[in-house]
Image (spheres, helix red, strand yellow):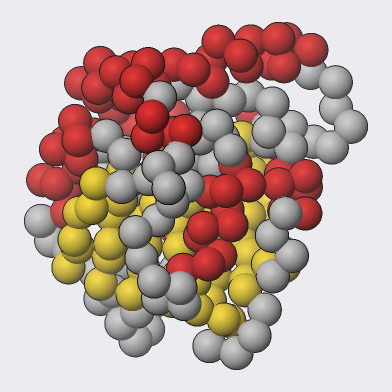
Amino acid sequence: MTSDYRCNPLLRLSYSLIAPVYDLVIERPMRAARKRSLAALPAGASRHVLVSGIGTGLDLPHLPTQHHYTALDFNAAMLARARPRGEKLDVEFVLGDSMALPFAGNHFDHVVLHLITAVVPDPASCLSEAARVLKPGGTIILFDKFLRAGKAAPLRRLLTPLSGRIATRMDVVFEKVLLAVPELEIISDEPMMARGWFRGIILTKKGLL
Protein backbone atom coordinates (compact mmCIF):
# COMPACT_ATOMS: atom_id res chain seq x y z
CA MET A 1 0.00 0.00 0.00
CA THR A 2 1.33 3.44 -0.88
CA SER A 3 1.64 5.62 2.22
CA ASP A 4 0.43 9.19 2.69
CA TYR A 5 4.04 10.33 2.79
CA ARG A 6 4.72 9.33 -0.80
CA CYS A 7 1.33 10.66 -1.88
CA ASN A 8 2.01 14.10 -0.38
CA PRO A 9 2.92 16.20 -3.47
CA LEU A 10 3.48 19.38 -1.46
CA LEU A 11 6.04 17.74 0.82
CA ARG A 12 7.80 16.11 -2.14
CA LEU A 13 7.92 19.42 -4.02
CA SER A 14 9.08 21.25 -0.91
CA TYR A 15 12.08 18.98 -0.43
CA SER A 16 12.95 19.17 -4.12
CA LEU A 17 13.10 22.96 -3.76
CA ILE A 18 14.93 22.79 -0.43
CA ALA A 19 17.59 20.33 -1.62
CA PRO A 20 20.03 22.92 -3.09
CA VAL A 21 20.09 25.01 0.11
CA TYR A 22 19.47 22.31 2.70
CA ASP A 23 23.15 21.79 3.49
CA LEU A 24 23.79 25.51 4.03
CA VAL A 25 21.11 25.63 6.70
CA ILE A 26 21.53 22.23 8.35
CA GLU A 27 25.09 20.93 7.98
CA ARG A 28 27.17 23.13 10.29
CA PRO A 29 24.80 23.50 13.27
CA MET A 30 23.99 19.78 13.26
CA ARG A 31 27.49 18.43 12.57
CA ALA A 32 28.69 17.74 16.12
CA ALA A 33 25.41 16.16 17.23
CA ARG A 34 25.27 14.07 14.07
CA LYS A 35 28.79 12.71 14.63
CA ARG A 36 28.06 12.04 18.30
CA SER A 37 24.96 10.07 17.40
CA LEU A 38 26.68 8.01 14.69
CA ALA A 39 29.49 7.09 17.07
CA ALA A 40 27.04 4.46 18.36
CA LEU A 41 27.62 2.39 15.22
CA PRO A 42 30.06 -0.46 15.94
CA ALA A 43 33.61 -0.12 14.69
CA GLY A 44 34.29 -3.85 14.47
CA ALA A 45 33.04 -6.46 11.99
CA SER A 46 31.15 -5.42 8.88
CA ARG A 47 27.39 -5.10 9.33
CA HIS A 48 24.43 -4.20 7.11
CA VAL A 49 23.15 -0.75 8.06
CA LEU A 50 20.05 1.05 6.82
CA VAL A 51 20.09 4.84 6.82
CA SER A 52 16.40 5.64 6.44
CA GLY A 53 15.82 9.21 5.29
CA ILE A 54 19.35 9.90 4.08
CA GLY A 55 18.42 13.34 2.70
CA THR A 56 21.41 15.01 1.05
CA GLY A 57 23.79 12.53 2.66
CA LEU A 58 25.16 14.60 5.52
CA ASP A 59 25.57 11.42 7.59
CA LEU A 60 27.73 9.70 4.99
CA PRO A 61 31.10 11.37 5.75
CA HIS A 62 30.78 10.34 9.41
CA LEU A 63 29.96 6.66 8.90
CA PRO A 64 32.48 3.85 9.61
CA THR A 65 33.81 2.57 6.31
CA GLN A 66 33.69 -1.18 7.00
CA HIS A 67 29.91 -1.57 6.90
CA HIS A 68 27.57 -2.09 3.94
CA TYR A 69 24.99 0.69 3.83
CA THR A 70 21.58 1.06 2.26
CA ALA A 71 20.66 4.75 2.04
CA LEU A 72 16.96 5.42 1.44
CA ASP A 73 15.06 8.63 0.76
CA PHE A 74 11.68 9.47 -0.76
CA ASN A 75 13.03 12.41 -2.78
CA ALA A 76 15.13 11.93 -5.92
CA ALA A 77 16.64 15.42 -5.68
CA MET A 78 17.93 14.68 -2.20
CA LEU A 79 19.37 11.32 -3.29
CA ALA A 80 21.15 12.95 -6.23
CA ARG A 81 22.97 15.25 -3.83
CA ALA A 82 23.75 12.38 -1.45
CA ARG A 83 25.43 10.06 -3.96
CA PRO A 84 28.78 11.93 -4.25
CA ARG A 85 29.16 11.83 -0.48
CA GLY A 86 29.06 8.04 -0.52
CA GLU A 87 31.97 7.49 -2.92
CA LYS A 88 34.24 6.08 -0.20
CA LEU A 89 31.59 3.78 1.24
CA ASP A 90 29.97 0.51 0.25
CA VAL A 91 26.51 2.04 -0.17
CA GLU A 92 23.39 1.37 -2.21
CA PHE A 93 20.96 4.26 -2.75
CA VAL A 94 17.25 3.46 -2.81
CA LEU A 95 14.28 5.68 -3.64
CA GLY A 96 11.64 4.65 -1.12
CA ASP A 97 9.41 5.53 1.80
CA SER A 98 10.50 5.37 5.44
CA MET A 99 6.92 4.53 6.42
CA ALA A 100 6.71 1.59 4.00
CA LEU A 101 10.23 0.20 3.62
CA PRO A 102 10.83 -2.01 0.56
CA PHE A 103 12.85 -4.60 2.51
CA ALA A 104 12.17 -7.96 4.12
CA GLY A 105 11.82 -8.27 7.88
CA ASN A 106 14.89 -8.90 10.08
CA HIS A 107 17.18 -7.73 7.26
CA PHE A 108 19.48 -5.11 8.83
CA ASP A 109 21.87 -5.22 11.77
CA HIS A 110 21.41 -1.51 12.53
CA VAL A 111 19.09 1.28 11.40
CA VAL A 112 19.90 5.00 11.47
CA LEU A 113 16.97 7.43 11.76
CA HIS A 114 18.38 10.95 11.65
CA LEU A 115 15.95 13.85 11.33
CA ILE A 116 13.29 11.69 9.69
CA THR A 117 10.98 10.49 12.47
CA ALA A 118 9.63 14.01 13.04
CA VAL A 119 9.38 14.73 9.30
CA VAL A 120 7.00 11.97 8.24
CA PRO A 121 3.26 12.41 8.83
CA ASP A 122 3.12 9.17 10.84
CA PRO A 123 6.17 8.81 13.13
CA ALA A 124 4.88 5.55 14.61
CA SER A 125 4.82 3.94 11.14
CA CYS A 126 8.38 5.13 10.51
CA LEU A 127 9.64 3.64 13.77
CA SER A 128 7.58 0.47 13.34
CA GLU A 129 9.00 -0.11 9.87
CA ALA A 130 12.53 0.42 11.16
CA ALA A 131 11.85 -2.19 13.85
CA ARG A 132 10.35 -4.61 11.32
CA VAL A 133 13.44 -4.66 9.08
CA LEU A 134 15.85 -4.75 12.04
CA LYS A 135 17.25 -8.07 13.21
CA PRO A 136 16.49 -9.07 16.82
CA GLY A 137 19.23 -7.69 19.03
CA GLY A 138 20.05 -4.96 16.52
CA THR A 139 19.94 -1.25 17.26
CA ILE A 140 18.14 1.83 15.99
CA ILE A 141 20.18 5.02 16.25
CA LEU A 142 17.81 7.95 16.34
CA PHE A 143 18.51 11.70 16.35
CA ASP A 144 15.60 14.12 16.10
CA LYS A 145 13.53 16.79 17.83
CA PHE A 146 10.85 15.64 20.24
CA LEU A 147 8.59 17.37 22.71
CA ARG A 148 8.89 16.11 26.25
CA ALA A 149 5.81 14.26 27.44
CA GLY A 150 3.41 16.71 29.09
CA LYS A 151 5.13 19.81 27.70
CA ALA A 152 2.63 22.34 26.34
CA ALA A 153 4.81 24.06 23.67
CA PRO A 154 1.78 25.89 22.21
CA LEU A 155 3.71 27.64 19.41
CA ARG A 156 5.28 24.42 18.13
CA ARG A 157 1.91 22.69 18.18
CA LEU A 158 0.25 25.64 16.45
CA LEU A 159 2.82 25.71 13.63
CA THR A 160 2.88 21.95 13.03
CA PRO A 161 -0.14 21.76 10.63
CA LEU A 162 1.75 24.07 8.24
CA SER A 163 5.35 23.02 8.93
CA GLY A 164 4.42 19.36 8.68
CA ARG A 165 3.07 19.82 5.17
CA ILE A 166 6.19 21.54 3.81
CA ALA A 167 9.13 20.40 5.95
CA THR A 168 8.85 18.88 9.42
CA ARG A 169 6.59 18.31 12.39
CA MET A 170 7.33 20.02 15.70
CA ASP A 171 4.83 18.29 17.97
CA VAL A 172 6.10 14.70 18.10
CA VAL A 173 6.33 13.14 21.57
CA PHE A 174 8.73 10.21 21.34
CA GLU A 175 7.31 8.38 24.34
CA LYS A 176 3.92 8.20 22.58
CA VAL A 177 5.53 6.97 19.37
CA LEU A 178 7.42 4.23 21.20
CA LEU A 179 4.20 2.86 22.71
CA ALA A 180 3.20 1.72 19.22
CA VAL A 181 6.38 -0.39 18.84
CA PRO A 182 6.56 -2.61 21.94
CA GLU A 183 9.35 -4.79 20.52
CA LEU A 184 11.77 -1.90 21.00
CA GLU A 185 13.39 -0.84 24.24
CA ILE A 186 15.56 2.16 25.06
CA ILE A 187 19.28 1.68 25.65
CA SER A 188 20.09 5.37 26.04
CA ASP A 189 18.38 8.74 25.67
CA GLU A 190 20.51 11.89 25.78
CA PRO A 191 19.88 15.59 25.09
CA MET A 192 21.80 16.74 22.01
CA MET A 193 20.81 20.30 21.10
CA ALA A 194 18.41 23.17 21.81
CA ARG A 195 18.09 22.45 25.55
CA GLY A 196 17.06 18.88 24.94
CA TRP A 197 14.56 19.47 22.15
CA PHE A 198 16.90 17.42 19.94
CA ARG A 199 17.67 14.04 21.48
CA GLY A 200 19.95 11.14 20.67
CA ILE A 201 18.16 7.87 21.37
CA ILE A 202 19.45 4.32 20.96
CA LEU A 203 16.93 1.50 20.83
CA THR A 204 17.30 -2.25 20.59
CA LYS A 205 14.94 -4.87 19.21
CA LYS A 206 14.21 -7.50 21.81
CA GLY A 207 15.76 -10.86 21.08
CA LEU A 208 19.21 -12.20 20.15
CA LEU A 209 21.18 -11.04 17.09
Can you name the residue that lies furthest to the front here? Answer: 1
Q: Residue at x 40, y 42 (%)?
A: 2
* Displayed quadrant of residue 159: top right
Report the side of 57 relative to 87 (left or right): right
Q: Is residue 136 above or below residue 71?
A: below
Counting from the top left corner in percent of width and height, residue 179 is at 77, 54
Question: Quick check: can you spot residue 36?
Answer: no
Which of 1/37 is in front? 1
Residue projecting furthest to the right: 150
Image quadrant where residue 155 sits: top right
With respect to residue 27, does 79 lie above or below? below
Q: Where is residue 41 in the image (x, y as percent from the top left)?
A: 44, 68
Q: In percent of the image, x 55 and y 32: which residue is there? A: 121
Q: In this view, does 178 lie to the left or right of 135?
A: right
Q: Tell me where residue 70 appears, x and y as whole percent.
A: 28, 62
Vertical placement of 9 versus 6: above or below?
Answer: above
Q: Is 76 displayed left or right of 10 in the figure?
A: left
Q: Can residue 136 be seen in this view?
A: yes
Locate residue 120 relative to residue 7 in the image: left or right: right
